[in-house]
Amino acid sequence: MRIVTTAGIWLIRFAYLAFALFPLLWLLRIALTPDQLLYTEGTTLWPSVITFENFRYVIEESPFPTYFLNTVIVSLGTAAIVTVLSTGIGYAFSRFRFRGKTALMVFLVITQLFPIVMLITPLYQILAPVGLVDTRIGLVVVFTAFNLPFAAFLMHSFFEGIPRELEQAAMIDGCTRFQALIRIILPLMLPGVGATLGFVFTAAWSELLFSLMLISSEAKKTFAVGLLSFVGRSGVDWGQMMAAATLALIPPAIFFTAIQKYLVGGLTAGAIKG
Amino acid sequence: MAEVSLKGVVKRFGPVQAVHDFTLDIAHEEFVVFVGPSGCGKSTTLRMIAGLEDISGGEIRIGDRVVNDLPPRARDISMVFQNYALYPHMTVRDNQGFGLKIAGSPKSEIAEKVGRAAKLLGIESFLTRKPAALSGGQRQRVAMGRAIVRDPAVFLFDEPLSNLDAKLRGQMRTEIRKLHEKVRTTVIYVTHDQVEAMTLADRIVVMRDGRIEQVGTPDEVYHLPASDFVAGFIGSPPMNLLDARTVRDGDGLAVEIPGGPRLPLDPEACRGIEPGRDVRLGLRPEAIAPERIASEMRRPFSFTADITLVEPLGGEALIFLEIGGTEVTARVFRPNTRLSPEKDVPFVVDLGELNLFDPESGRRLCGTRRMPTQ
Ligand SMILES: Nc1ncnc2c1ncn2[C@@H]1O[C@H](COP(=O)(O)OP(=O)(O)OP(=O)(O)O)[C@@H](O)[C@H]1O
Ligand SMILES: [Mg+2]
């Protein structure tokens, strides 16, 4: 009976994994298939011959490395800025009483209600006079503005999960409020910081709409915009497109591997009675 | 030297006034316990002393400094929280040494002090563990260790034992008392458990609705409660309270329970109370006993009453009797005869243990217990 249950559970897990990972497999399969076999071999799971030609082309002959670098800069910049700011905002919302706090929080929620498409024209008009159109900094500013409210809420709820007595104890033990934050609260916030970083990084990494609208010069395009250029004049070059997409998956994968140990919660266990 | 003195301290949370005009002087090395029902402002007062809560009015002094505007770190205090508040990402050793490390003490000194505190509290064997790997009682000790290590002028405790089970709580209570004998410091201890208050305190501060109801030694609070509230709050079972009336009794004064006995009052203790006045008579359960098993009393006075119920508790027994239609609890120690409900049983009451309260205000009018003068 036990064995049947365990087997059943594994079967479900396996089915789920297969379902979730199949698109990735397909991505890789097409990237590795020589062009001339793409349509002749139909939908076999794996091509009879594989080639790295698509990858070589993307890396050596297309402007992808530039797109890539742009995306890394914009995503990392956005993730870092949003995380720092939302940490401050979340802490203030969680720990301080001040006038207009509730109103401010409601306001943050309201900003999330507008369909983003509505904002593109006004945003363009705002950014153009200050020279932020067609710049990477402009993208970082816009991404930061759009991700900050949610990130602030996320951080706020993480701060709420940390007992106030911990920093009070630290302040009695000789810390200033800032020292208590740095030495006691932030180490316990690492899962929260990791989650926020990860969330914002991925959001910025795959953002298309604003990048498409705000960036025009080839040298500043991000990866998502660049992918569209494969949908070209003479049809779609599937092999190259999939090779580029495969490469684009690598940075988020590295990033999440790096922060995954902080994403695992449970660090606050034992702070209070249990 | 660290006296703590509060003068007219007030705390408001918006429109809610949590603490009213709190004035108290705490002596150097004194162990003071704030006790009172939930929500009476004990924690708020303690947190104002700690600097974790701003004060809305008045003055707080620690030693010879007014600390009203000093941050917690500058007040030379340490605090043990109800939930212990141990730093979860640090080992027990680092938890204990944290305050000294922040203060910039040399490593050797930290190690020595942490070691000494750990020995005192018997936590040496888990210095390298994280708090999550400790039991409730062990965390409690670590929290106390962290407070001791810094050698502060004042210790603050906010219900440190309320998360422990009954047995451990009793054990830790004794240890805290012993600890105070060894580490002489001023202690302010908050609890809602009157047993803790009675066993630990040099002086008890009974609070109610943000005000001090009475300040006194455990004996004073127990035997001469300032009000019927204190009489009911301190002691388990609480003091019996009976509606009665003062009457002239020869040259002196007596208190008469309608339908019950008339008890002569100590003329000296109850001077100035006019006859014919409604009062509430307070009688501790130990001040009443069946005559044949009564232990020695200061001023025994005999009467008869009906026993309605007996609850044996091992070393002691509670006897429920009826005086003038009111149920009264008596407590006798080591009863060696079997007791059972019975009519017209001879009882004695100790006239040296009477308290009269004003039925309206609840304040004590007089008490006949003589306190040893200091
Ligand atoms: N931050 C706050 N905002 C508003 N009211 C508060 C706040 N903290 C405490 N109070 C109020 O102040 C009063 C006293 O609270 P306090 O925590 O001091 O009670 P306590 O005597 O410690 O009770 P307990 O035994 O339940 O811990 C309560 O009525 C409480 O509701
Ligand atoms: Mg409290």
Image (tube, coloured by chain):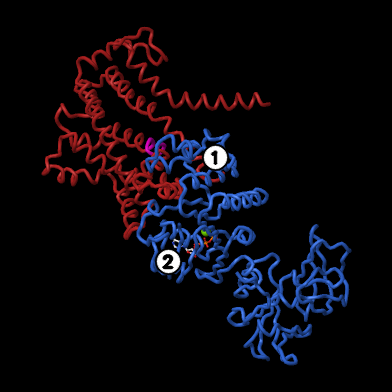
Q: Are marks 2 and 1 on the same chain?
A: yes
Placement of B110 over or under B288, stated as above or below: above
Q: Quadrant of residue A252?
A: top left
Label 2 CA crowd tier, 10 Å (few <14, some 14–19, many 20+): many
Q: Residue, x 66% and y 71% (percent of image)?
A: B223
Chain ID at mark 2: B
Residue A191 lies within the magenta run: yes
Q: Residue, x 61% and y 49% (percent of image)?
A: B175
The response on whether ligand 1 sits within 8 Å of label 2 is yes
Residue B3 lies within the magenta run: no
Q: Which residue is mark 1?
A: B118
Q: Secondary structure at mark 2?
A: strand
Q: Which is more foreground, mark 2 or mark 1?
A: 1
Q: Which residue is mark 2?
A: B11
Chain ID at mark 1: B
What range is drawn magenta here?
Answer: A190-195
Q: Which chain is blue?
A: B
Q: Position of residue A19 (x, y in %)?
A: 46, 26
Q: Nearer the viewer, residue B180 or B338?
A: B180
Q: Colour of chain A?
A: red
Q: Position of residue A40 (x, y in %)?
A: 34, 11
State left or right for residue B38 relative to residue A132: right
Task: Locate the N terminus of chain A and report the quarter of the image it occupies.
Answer: top right
Q: Secondary structure at mark 1?
A: helix
State left or right for residue A28 relative to residue B185: left
Q: Residue furthest front?
A: B374
